[in-house]
Image (cartoon, rainbow, N blue to C red):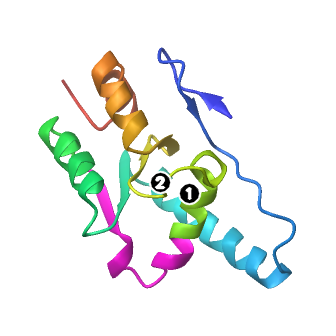
Amino acid sequence: MQVAKKTGIQMANTMTFNSKASSSASVNLEKTYETVTKLASSNAVVLFSMSGCCMCTVAKRLLFGLGVGPAVVELDHHAAGPEIEAVLFQLSSNGQHQPVPAVFVGGKFLGGIETLMGCHINGTLVPLLKDAGALWL
């Protein structure tokens, strides 16, 4: 785990896979994880979403309202949506929370709606977005 500057929020940059899964499923998840990390590292802010998810809409409105133009991946419209959702489920507190919305800032997994809103309320979201190059204010 890596700690975000100035916030005390832990941001994941590694992932472990369940050893009970079959080797082909594990390899598929690893490839999907690589795809997710490549996408996250090539954009300042990435939001994985589902088109009918109300909390995903809240996350999008918050980010767009702050002047951020996140790369939005709608999993229900993406060919690898179920695989990406499985990876996000593993990233989100070891599968204890809903996998979407999932927010990556500066190539690192920030978290879901609770973390995003918490950072916004306590004033640490804007500095994170500035550090990632998503805001120029």
**Position of residue 35 measured from the top left corner of the image (x, y, whole percent):** 56, 68
Quadrant in which the C terminus appears: top left
Q: From the viewer's perspective, tell me whether residue 6 is left or right of residue 67.
A: right
Q: Is residue 71 within the magenta segment? A: yes
**Position of residue 110 measured from the top left corner of the image (x, y, whole percent):** 48, 39
- Give residue 25's quadrant in the image: bottom right
Quadrant in which the N terminus appears: top right
Task: Say what secondary structure mark 2 lies in.
Answer: helix
Crowd rating for badge 1 (residues with CA inside 10 Å; few <14, some 14–19, many 20+): some
| Badge number at residue 97 | none
Residue highlighted by disc 1: 37
**Position of residue 130 measured from the top left corner of the image (x, y, whole percent):** 32, 27
Which residue is pictured at 32% across the width and 67% down the height?
50
Which residue is pictured at 81% across the width and 74% down the height?
21
Task: Say what secondary structure mark 1 lies in.
Answer: helix
Q: From the viewer's perspective, tell me whether residue 26 is left or right of residue 62.
A: right
**Position of residue 132 measured from the top left corner of the image (x, y, whole percent):** 39, 34
Residue highlighted by disc 2: 40
Question: Is the residue 38 above or below the residue 124 in the image?
Answer: below
Of residues 72 and 121, the one nearer the viewer is 121
Residue type, numbered disc 1: Thr
Question: Is the residue 100 above or below the residue 21 in the image?
Answer: above
Residue type, numbered disc 2: Ala
Question: Is the residue 77 above or below the residue 97 in the image?
Answer: below
Start-end of magenta stretch: 70-84
Of residues 71 and 90, the one nearer the viewer is 90
Which residue is pictured at 60% across the width and 71% down the height?
32
Question: Is the residue 20 above or below the residue 91 in the image?
Answer: below
Q: Are marks 2 and 1 in contact (CB under 8 Å)?
A: yes
